[in-house]
Image (cartoon, grey):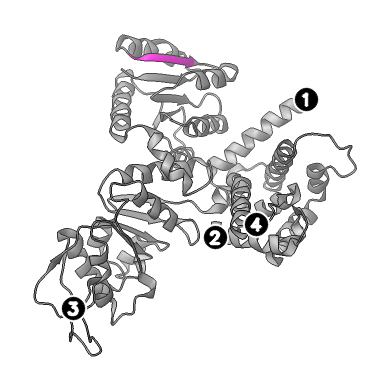
Amino acid sequence: MAKVFIIDRDPEMQGGFRQSLEQAGHSVVWASDRSTLDQARLAHRCDVAFVGSEFGDASSLDILNALRCQPSPPEVLMLSSTADPDLAEAALRAGAWDFVVKPCSTERLLRLLDRAVSSRLQSGDDRVIQPMQSALVGSDPRLMYCLRQAALAAQSMNEVLVMGETGTGKDLVARAVHNASKRKNGPFVIVDCAALPGNLAESLLFGHVRGAFTGAESSQQGLVAQANGGTLFLDEVGELPIAVQSKFLRVLQTRRYRPVGAQREEKSDFRLIAATNRDLEKMTREGGFRSDLLFRLKTVHVDLPPLRERKGDISALAVHLLSRHARESSQQLKGASPEFLQALSSYGWPGNVRELKHALEAACLAAGDAPTLLPHHLPFELRVCYTRDVVGRPELCQKCFGENQKFEPVTWAEYRKRAVKTAEAEYVLGVLEHTGQNVKKAISLSGLKTARFYELMKSVKKRKKKEKF
């Protein structure tokens, strides 16, 4: 039987549903207010959690994120009294197993519970995520969901499609899946589809025999053959020539291929992982990508979020990348000032983690022997974004970094945490004021996902309550 965590103020949930769960043999932990929530959440590891909306939308998403970020998170079913499509989308994107609109019968909730438990048992223990966490740094719920998908993919032999913008770490996820799979001791063969010359693409993929075409002075093994016993990684699969796609689909279906100019087919036992930064479904509609190949590739898909949608991970990422840079370059590790971290958060990062890495390396070079990185060490475009942010709201600089205020001797980690929290609070209050307290407009203006903006709103409310006392 399952361990069930219920977080709801609804009297019907406290009464009939809880009783039905216990009669069915499930173990039930209850939290009806925020004062008991964190204690219960940390003390009891559960399989499934029901989270009600009576705490408020922002708080419900906050609870969902807290649950999904645990080392072995439960499946979460969000319960809402209102049919809000935006909240439903935010919940699913944050990792909810399902979104249910009340009123909902006890029988239906029990069926959903059984399905969630079955899904959890089939997916296995979330400890399988650990090998993936060395690939990408962060604790954002969307990222954690992606890593879980990748971890589950590593346990199967299915094709995997990794999607995401340039620089999000698609290649790192692909290699992590390979390294965590049964084929980890086999070859990991990379095919850069964007660099495949149209007239030689088949030869490079499938190989050729001597005399197959002008210049083929000897037989050559293709990349598909080289991946035998291991993993074939098609990087930027959206660039694969349309003429090659049909032939590659047949290779996927049979694991057999014919080298250019050969009379007989050959066999290769490989596992396929593909990656793309393009919208393959749109390409399919426009005739640029075969729909049958896309369906085959999407057996398992991992959709990596861009860095601008997980800005809460930027500080941890920066520390990780600075440590790695210092280690690889045999240089002294540099610290990051609160202003420096705020500058990183004010930028949109169109090049994602890859651009962040290069910006940090450039900042280390510009800093010379200085032990601490400051905003003026960053590349010009980043400094412009930060300067515009500070000049537009000068009080932010004062409140975050203590100008004209007495210095309080706290640890660096605490000082940085306070600075970031203050900046987040000022931004949320400012954008809400600018939009006349219209939350939807504020979310659109901020460029943040709905779930993340609600998190920040909740954090601001808690901060303001503390300041009253």
The residue mark sitting in front, 1 or 2, is 2
Q: Disc 2 marks which amino acid? A: Arg
Q: Are marks 1 and 2 in contact (CB under 8 Å)?
A: no
Q: Which residues are magenta?
A: 26-30
First in sequence: mark 3 or mark 4?
A: 3
Q: CA distance from mark 2 to mark 3?
A: 37 Å
The residue mark sitting in front, 1 or 4, is 4
Query: Quick one: which residue is furthest to the front in this view?
Result: 330
Q: Which mark is residue 347?
A: 4
Relative to 307, is 141 above or below? above
Q: Which residue is found at the position 61% from the left and 42% from the top? A: 439
Q: Is residue 307 left or right of residue 246?
A: right
Q: Secondary structure at mark 1?
A: helix
Q: CA distance from mark 1 to mark 2?
A: 42 Å
Query: Quick one: which residue is furthest to the bottom in this view?
Result: 214
Residue 359: x %, y % from top left: 64, 61
Q: CA distance from mark 3 to mark 4?
A: 49 Å
Within-10-Å neighbours for mark 1: few <14, some 14–19, many 20+: few
Q: Nearer the viewer, residue 67 or 289?
A: 67
Circle 3 is placed at which residue position? 260
Q: CA distance from mark 2 to mark 4?
A: 14 Å
Q: Secondary structure at mark 3?
A: loop
Q: Secondary structure at mark 4?
A: loop
Residue 228: x %, y % from top left: 23, 60
Q: Disc 3 marks which amino acid? A: Val
Q: Is residue 255 left or right of residue 442?
A: left
Q: Which mark is residue 354?
A: 2
Q: Secondary structure at mark 2?
A: helix
First in sequence: mark 1 or mark 2?
A: 2
